[in-house]
Amino acid sequence: MKKGQSATESMVLITLLTFLLIASLAAVSDDIIRASNSKYENLLKELSEVIEREAQIALSSEDGYYHQFTLPPTLNGLPYIVSVTNSTLISGQANFTLLGVASQKAGLPLNVTKALARDVRGTVVRGVNTIGKEENIIVLRPLPLTSVQGAACSTCSEGIVTLEECCDHGYAACCQ
């Protein structure tokens, strides 16, 4: 009877310790995932601040200002998207401009939105962009990719960073 009781107690103890180990691992992995998401969100915020600073510099500059800046293809290997949205309700002038930097990672709905000066217009993509000031309007544009022969490759500049990516996405005109 004593050996049977000892075996039962051992099984209960092993089961309890296994449960505690699994609970500890679950808690630690949840913290790691939370820390990773927080780091990604901070990277999105930093990227939005870079674009906001570029717009502020252009806004405080004279007409004719021009500058190139580059946005990385990914943030620590994770995809993102950038958008600039204007509201042009009254006489063709924007009442406000919003900059959005958002996660494209499935299951991770992170989004950073910033208000920019109302006269900021255009498009920003991953890769090389230009910002300029023309008639007191700040204009953001992606720098068109060029093909091997030097021709503009504007059909594939939306969100695609390199000519290799153009080729990978089926833009044959860029790959000749």
Image: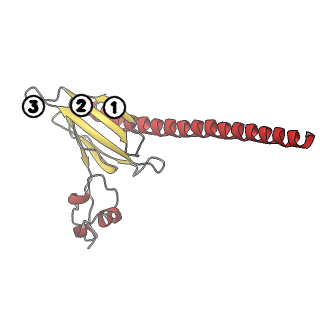
Q: Quadrant of residue 27?
A: top right
Question: 26 or 46, which lies in front?
Answer: 26
Question: 121 or 107, which lies in front?
Answer: 107
Residue 106, position in %: x, y? 40, 46
Gap between marks 1 and 2 measured at Cα: 10 Å
Circles 1 and 2 in contact, beta carbons < 8 Å: no
Residue 92 disc label: 3
Q: How is the image coloured?
A: secondary structure
Q: Indicate the secondary structure of the residue bearing disc 3.
A: loop
Residue placed at 34% from the left, 49% from the top? 126
Are there few (<14), some (14-19), or many (20+) residues within 10 Å of tag 2? some
In primary-sequence order, the first of circles 1 and 3 is 3
Residue 29, position in %: x, y? 60, 40
Residue placed at 41% from the left, 42% from the top? 107
In primary-sequence order, the first of circles 3 and 2 is 3
Gap between marks 3 and 2 measured at Cα: 13 Å
Q: Indicate the secondary structure of the residue bearing disc 2.
A: strand
Are there few (<14), some (14-19), or many (20+) residues within 10 Å of tag 3? few
Circles 1 and 3 in contact, beta carbons < 8 Å: no
In primary-sequence order, the first of circles 1 and 2 is 2
Q: Is 18 left, or right, of 55 in this rendering?
A: right
Q: Which residue is mark 1?
A: 113
Q: Is residue 134 above or below residue 157?
A: above
**Kind of residue at badge 1:** Thr
Residue 72, position in %: x, y? 40, 49
Q: Which residue is mark 2?
A: 97
